Image (spheres, grey):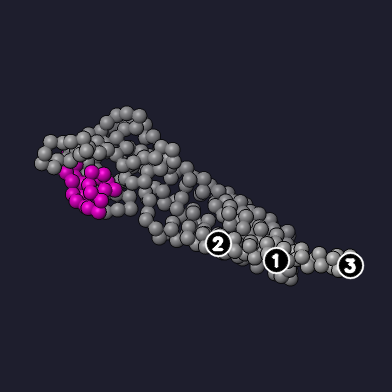
Amino acid sequence: MARQQSGLPRRQSGWRWAAIAGLSVVTFLGLLVATLIGVANAFGPGPFPEQYPYSHYLVASALWGMTVVPGGILLALRHRRWRSEALLPVLLGADLALLLAILWPVEALLLAVGLALRARRARQRVGAIAVGALLLVAGGWWGLDAYARQHVRDPGPVVAGQLTGTWHEAGGPGALELRADGNFTLRHATPGLDPSLPTGTATDEAGTWMMQDGDVPSVLLTPARGRPAELSDLFAFDVQLIGPAQVLCLQTDPDEGRCPSGLHR
């Protein structure tokens, strides 16, 4: 009986170290995902400029996960021995922080409270809480405002005169000029802007345009290709709003409130 009892703590310790190994892998993968998110939003194909603030917020979230979470692990274990009893809760907290890194303003406040509890002087405690509260308010406002602005919205009443001018493809070389006389010129058109073009081609288009009213106002383009217009020749851009700016969306996803391709001024 004594041998069985003496072997039980070792068995429990073995399970703990196995759990630590698994959580360490999860932590590494979480840091890798955070890095990929940061790179994708910092250097990937740009969305509409009006959506940049949310991309920047995601970059900040990724940087938070990449730097503060590993730092938090080292800080939590600074005054402890690297035992399984200490590592398990620290790694669990780090994985939760990585999973919720997009809520980094809240995590910043929690970190500030933790630092304040460790501080010896009242001035340090007040300073830590003040910085945490500032990050919560500023970061929270930034994230909520940027998230709300990135979605397309109904522009309300629109008249054709509001749409004349030059529109530029979001993340691409295309440019669409809508003239007041009802003619248009589409330069460097690709299938991303003209679905009637074959894949992998690019060309210039010219023709006539008109505005159509409906649930969502749209701009209907009719290219002049030296033959009578066919149904396949017609393509339209929905007029939408992203933040305060008007955009022309080739394909609007109403469920996600997204505009995968289109033009902006």
Up the image or down, 183 lies above or below 214; here it is: below
Q: What secondary structure is marked by label 1?
A: helix
Residue occupying the far right of the picture? 2
- Expressed as whole percent of the image width and height from the top left, the position of residue 78 reads 70, 69
Up the image or down, 87 lies above or below 166; here it is: below
The magenta segment is 182-206
Report whether residue 74 is seen.
yes
Counting residues from the start of the chain, the first of labels 2 and 3 encountered is 3
Q: What residue type is labelled 1?
A: Trp
Q: What secondary structure is marked by label 2?
A: helix
Residue 29 tag number: 2
- Is the C-beta separation of discs 3 and 1 under 8 Å? no
Looking at the figure, which quarter contains the N terminus?
bottom right
Residue 61 tag number: none
Which quarter of the picture shows residue 99? bottom right
Left or right: 158 as drawn, with respect to 92: left
Marks 1/2: CA–CA distance: 18 Å
Point 61% across, 51% down: residue: 106
Residue 17 tag number: 1
Q: What secondary structure is marked by label 3?
A: helix
- Expressed as whole percent of the image width and height from the top left, the position of residue 215 reads 35, 29
- Expressed as whole percent of the image width and height from the top left, the position of residue 85 reads 75, 64
Q: Which amino acid does label 2 sit on?
A: Leu
- Is residue 222 a member of the stretch shown in magenta? no
- Is residue 190 a member of the stretch shown in magenta? yes
Marks 3/1: CA–CA distance: 24 Å
Disc 3 designates what residue?
2
Q: Which of pointers 1 and 2 indicates the residue nearer the eye?
A: 1
